[in-house]
Image: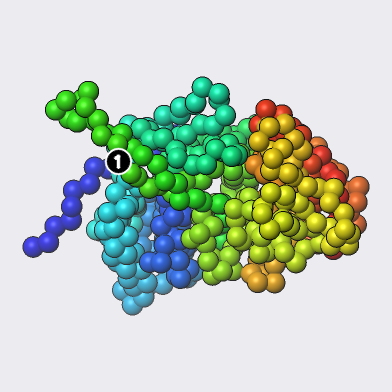
Amino acid sequence: MITEPVIESWTPSSELEKGAVQQQLERLLASPLFHSSKRYAQFLRFVVGRTLEGQGHDLKERILGIEVFDRPPDYDTTIDPIVRVTAAEIRKRIDQYYHDPKRGQEIRLFLPSGSYAPQFSWPGYPNGLAVAPSAPPNGSSVTVQTATESEQAKSVPHRWISTKALLLILAILVTIAAAGIWWRGSRPTILREFWAPFVKSPDPALFCIADQVQYANIRLRDAGDPQKEITLPDTMVTVIIDDLSPLVNVAGTLRSYSKNYRVLGESTTSLTDLRRSPSVFIGAFDNTWTLRLTSGLRFHFVNDTSMSKLWIEDREHPEKREWLLDRSLQKTEDYKDYAIVARFIPPDTDQYAVVAAGIGRGGTVAAGEFLVDEHRMQEILAHAPQDWQMKNIEIVLETQVIQGRSGPPRVRAIHIW
C-alpha cells in the first residue's frame, strides 16, 4: 500500500506570506511540467486564490467545473469528470516538480487526495533563509551572501545578491511597494495608461534580468574545532543588487493592479518565454535580450571594441555622442549616466516589451524610478499625440551619479511612433 508522505502544513496569513505563495505558484506554472497547459494554470490559480482568501472549504467539484471550466450549473459530474481528471494530473506533476532536490527549499504547494483546496509548506520558515550583508571598509560594494567573499574584478564596483536571497527579499519589497501605491489613493492616469497592455494581458508579466556566474570562496569551520577553517571554491549565480531597485519598483506597480509576474535570468530566458506574455527587460550591456530587442530602435546601445566607451546612439544623428559613458570616469563614482526607457512590440515576440536599461548601473536605477513616477512621466504627454496609448514609445534619460548613487532621471529625448 502506497501512502502519501506526511508534510507539515503551513497557513499563509500575512500579505508577505500570501505574496510569496503567489510567486511560488508562478514559478511552478513556468516550469516545463505546466507551462504548456492553460487548463492546469486556470485550475491552480483559481484554487490557490480562493484558498488564500480563506474560501478553500468552498472548493467543490461542481463549483470548479462551473467557475474554472465554464460548465453549465446542472452538468453531470459523473459523465464529465474534467475536475477530477485535471486535479489528478496536477497532483502527479506537482510531485514530479518537487522531486527535484533543487526545489527542497521552495514553498511547497500540494493538493491532498480527496480535496481541491491546496495546502502549503515552507521549509524552515521563518528561519530558513539568512541574509547577511557585509561591506568592505571603503563602502564601495556590498555582498549579500552568508559566509562568502567575492573574487570579482575591482575595476567597477558592483553590489551582488544571490538569486536565492533575491526571491525572499523581492517578495517583501514588492509587498511594501504595492502597499505604498495603494495608500496614495487613486491610480495616476499616466501610469495606468502606460502599463495598461501589461495589466490587460491574461498572462503574468515576465521580468528578464541580467544574471552572472559569480566565482567565490567559502570559508567553512570544522564542527569539532570551530577555530579551524578551510577555504573552498564555490560557484553561485547572482544578480546585481542595483537591478533590484527597478525590479521592485515596477513589480510593485503591477501588483497594485493585481497583476502577477515571474522573474527569469537572461541566460535562462527563451524566445518562447517572451512570446507568451508581456516582458520587462532590466539592464543593457549585461542583458543579451535588451541589446537584441533594442538594436533596431532609433535610440540603441553602442560601444567601442575595447568596451571602454559605451553610449546611446540616435540613428538619425549617428555622428553625435552626447550620451556617452567613459568607464574610466565610472570608476570615480561621479559621472553622468544615460538610459533607455521604451515600451514597444518587438517583431520577434509580438508581445509588449518595456525596457529599463542604463549604460551603467546608475542609469538602470534611474530608468526604474522614471517608470513608476507619475510626475516625471508627465513629460511624455508634452510630446505625445492624443492616441499615444496605442503607440510605441522610446525615451533617453540622463542622471547624475554622485558617490555611486544616481540622481533624479531627466528626459533628454522622446520618440513616439
Q: Position of residue 188 (x, y in %)?
A: 76, 41
Of 220 and 245, nearer the camera is: 220
For this rendering, which residue is in front, 66 or 367? 367
Determine the residue located farthest toward the bottom in the rendered image. 79
Please give the count of numbered marks on the rendered protein: 1
Q: Quadrant of residue 184?
A: top right
Image location of residue 187, percent across then percent down: 72, 41
Question: Which secondary structure, mark 1?
Answer: strand
| Amino acid type at image mark 1 | Leu
Quarter of the image with the N terminus is bottom left
Q: x%, y% of residue 172?
A: 50, 35
Residue 34: where, in percent of width, then height? Answer: 41, 65
- For image coordinates 14% across by 28% down, the residue present is 224
**307 and 56: which one is in front?**
307
> From the viewer's perspective, is residue 211 above or below residue 132?
below
Q: Residues within 10 Å of mark 1 (few under 14, many from 20)?
A: few
The residue at the point 66 percent across, 36 percent down is: 331
- Identify the image quadrant of residue 353: bottom right
Q: Residue at x 70, y 72 (%)?
A: 347
Q: Is residue 316 visible?
A: yes
Identify the colour scheme used. Answer: rainbow
**Residue 69 as seen in the image, left or right of residue 307:** left
Farthest front residue?
306
Q: Is residue 398 shown left or right of residue 306?
A: right
Relative depth, front residue between 225 and 178? 225
Quarter the C terminus occupies = bottom right
The residue where tag 1 is placed is 232
